[in-house]
Image (spheres, helix red, strand yellow):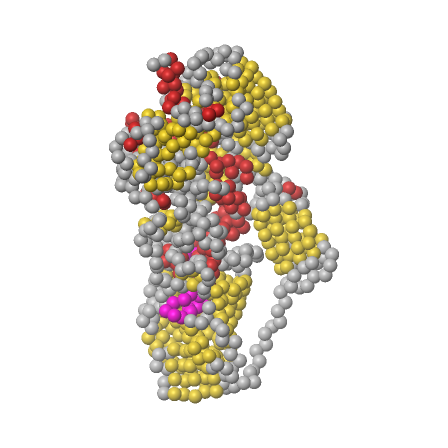
Amino acid sequence: MNLRSKKHIKMRLLFIILTLFSSMARAADTASFVLKRLSPLPQKTNDQANVKLDLNGSWFFDAAPDNGFENQNSVDESWEKIEVPGEWVMQGFTVEKDKWTGYARSFTLPQNWQGKRIKLRCDGVYSECSIYVNGKKIGSHLGGFTPFEFDITDHVKPGTESVIKIKVRNESIADSLASGSQYAVHALGGISRKIYLIAVPDVNISGFHVITNFDSAYKNAILKTQLQIANESANTVKTHSLLFELFSSKSNEVIFSKTVTSNEPIKDGGILNESFEFPINEPQKWDPEHPNLYRWRVTLQANQSSEVAERKIGFRQIEVRGNRVYVNNMPIKLRGACRHEVSPLRGRSLTGDQWKEDVKLFAEENVNYIRTSHYPPPEEFVHACDSLGMFLEVEAPFCWADQTNVPAPLYNSAILDQTLDMVNFYRSDPAVLDWSIANESQSAYNKYFKKSAEWVKKIDPTRPRTYNQYGDEDDHNELEIGNQHYPGPNGPMKYRNNERPMMFGEYCHLNAYNRLELVTDPGLRDAWGIGFKNMWEKMYNTPAILGGCIWAGIDDTFILPNGKVVGYGTWGPIDGWRRKKPEYWHVKKTYSPVKIQLAGNCENNSIKLLIENRLLFSNLNECKIKWHIGKNAGEISPSLAEGKKGDVIIHFDGNLSSADTLFVDVLDPREILIDQYAFAVFPEIKKADMERSSAVSLQYHQLKNTIIANTADVQIVLDMSSGKLTLAKKSAKQTTLQLGSLMILPLNPEGRGTQMTGDSQVFDPFTPVCTNRVVQKIVYDCQPQKFVVTIEDEYDEASGFTTFEFAANKKVAIHYRYVVKKNINPCQWGMVFSLSDDFNAISWKRDGLWNYYPKDHIGRLDGVAYASSKAPVSGPAGPVKKPDWSWSEDRTDLGTNDFRSTKMNFTKGEVKSDNMTVNFVSDGSQHMRAWKQDKQTRLLIAGYSNLGDEGFFRGHAEPFDRPLRQGDTITNDIHLFIQ
């Protein structure tokens, strides 16, 4: 075997001894760092641009291949086709647990790659694999969420067809440490991220990283560049040159250029680590509000060949000072969300522009920070955050790792390598704000993660670290940022004097596991915003709280090819199909960095607004505030520094009517619509309603145990044997309204466990009225102008009376009062009306948390909702096929999400059939909810409604609970009229 072959066998191991270029690292630890090579993608080599060969697409797959298949230098085309990237489960394949699968395909390298070094890059293969090219083993990799690279030069020939085979197994210690398959309730196995080949010269750039620091005035910067050059030729390289070029963030103009020539020899098979510092005058800074990216290009000339590599970089500096984190000398507050890689039909393997679309959705939601729970994301997502403006916490692929035993010989490959590959891959991306060492692995910190955290700091001393945990004690305060999950509403007070910045890595968990409640009342998703807003304001006003990440960002639901639905389900403000759910608007409004209040009525053609600027890096004059009222419109950009409040006057010409509303849209420096407002600038004028006697009298007649009262077109029927009261239109007897069943609906956290495991997701409605009613006494009074009925009755849950007063003008007043007989912590209590099945529409006006809502939001201040829609009936996880309708139109047998959701604090309500309309009026203290059941339409007018019983949100909901004890009284008045 010649020297060149021996050398390249050595190089194929791809373990590059990296002394990390600086004396600072050597001072921290005299040991060298061992990192796997991850080559920067070359732009071109020797003026050739075709330096990448995509291996994505159709492969051949065998779920149980014969032993030794990998050693055969051919593709068995009797195997089935599979898509790469992708998971095998989501493509309908069944693989026996712990078994190896086989992937195979052929490829042909371009002829002009002759003489190049050929690198195979896999961005993610879940969760353990071995790779073979033309029958020869190239290498193995453990871990499903981190990239890896192998040199295959000695096993391929440009212009000649080659065969690549990959043995893949889902179950491994990496899968166990990540809890990946357990978490997703299906095996994640497969080539789940992109795979490709690159060609580089035999003297090439094997590492390329940057660090940016500012001077004391945060005006000028030092651009530190760390290069690693690998000599994979057969000869010593005696000299090489490097051309550095910085391209403007706004144009293609070169704003800095420097050529460096080195005579330091690089032995064959050796590497050279070089570090450079370049002064850059007044660069535009990178932050989420100004994602200014420069192109930083390096051209290597060596051994009569050249290579061009390029990074998009941002000038950004992170510092921890006491219990605050500063970016570019500005204190930050993180408006965060947790995000999984998720697609209902593809699992944890995404394609196309989905990463960019996700970042846009989060940015429009006013999220400025995403935690990549619970594993590193693909580079497409990180680069989208770089370009669109989003802070990132990149998390190592360890979740509940304290449940897994890691034998000492596997520690480096199972934990250290995966962590360091993550850091090495993303440490030059400006969006990455901090590193998360693991998720909820509690006591495993000392055993597994103390060491990996130390190595993270050695590789990247520029970023803080955190350990996502249920308490803040497991990392012994060793890491720069403290962390607690679900601290509850008292969390900000608990940590207000914390010595280090405190992050709530998960908080304000959305309703998800209380599926019985959610199937019954999707309005709980609207009510969630109340508790969330209260929590965020406490966090925002506590400097030591760095911020938090709501759990979660996107629903975690997977629809298997057999139709079964698995996953944790509906815990996101965005569903798996990327539709905005009700919580999305609450996150957007609560996280809004520009708060506007009306500071006075319209007077003298002017309106005063009080504005608070919560942007972190922008004067308000960088935003566009567009307004319109009546026929008047304009735009203002007042100067208001970060964190400040001030009055702004809007002036206009032209007359307005008292019904005109001032609408305000706010666009941030990126031109993202970050908030919308609607202000009633004139007081509501309402003339007192003087009760007048009706010119029409009620007519009565009695049949055995029935009393019938008639108006001109409405009939009231009292069944004295049962106490039932029914209203009907004389012209359409099938259209009826039955009055008065008491409901005291208890909180109910049930949902068949936290995870959906493929079992039926059909839930019966949780809408029981009070049980075993016994009517004890009926008192009635037949007057010319009104029919008054008082019914004394008793239920298992309460006893009392209800009085109904029917006026000749078709107005109905209901008063009830009940004494509770047992302890109940209710979600809602009130009176349920049973209507005939032809009541299929409700409308309302209500007082809401915000003065503006999207038109399809279930919590909008006024609107009409219909029982049915074009959507097929679906379970609590939503549609199993990609919908082309809004989330509010999803439906179950109970009706659409919009129809059956509680409309809290209504002032006017209406339920309507083709023949009859029932109108309700309230003072805003009552709530209405409709649903379909037993071929009837039910309508609850509630005197009380709360935020539901999602266990992880309970602490935020409890302040709104009104538990009932035995002997407590519930009483309410309901007013309606018939049309």
Q: Position of residue 463 (x, y in %)?
A: 48, 30
* Picture residue at 41% right of the left edge, 54% below the top: 878
* Picture residue at 45% right of the left edge, 87% below the top: 700
Q: Position of residue 645 (x, y in %)?
A: 62, 46
**654 or 869, which is in the foreground?**
869
* Picture residue at 48% right of the left edge, 87% below the top: 699
Q: Is residue 543 above or below residue 8?
A: below
Instruction: Inspect the magenta stretch and tell me whether residue 941 lies in it.
Output: yes
The N terminus lies in quadrant: top left
* Picture residue at 48% right of the left edge, 13% below the top: 237
Q: Position of residue 526 (x, y in %)?
A: 47, 56
Residue 455 appears in the rendering: no
Residue farthest along the front direction in this orientation: 160
Q: Is residue 189 left or right of residue 283?
A: left
Residue 709 appears in the rendering: yes
Q: Is residue 577 above or below residue 176?
A: below
What secondary structure characterizes most of the magenta part? Answer: strand
Instruction: Inspect the magenta stretch and tell me whether residue 6 lies in it.
Output: no
**628 or 194, which is in the foreground?**
194
Which image quadrant for residue 32? top left
Q: Over which residues does the magenta segment extend? A: 930-948
Q: Position of residue 609 (x, y in %)?
A: 65, 52
Which image quadrant for residue 250? top right
Q: Is residue 855 above or below residue 261?
A: below
**756 or 623, which is in the foreground?**
756
Q: Is residue 422 above or below residue 768?
A: above
User: How many marks are shown on the rendered structure?
Assistant: 0
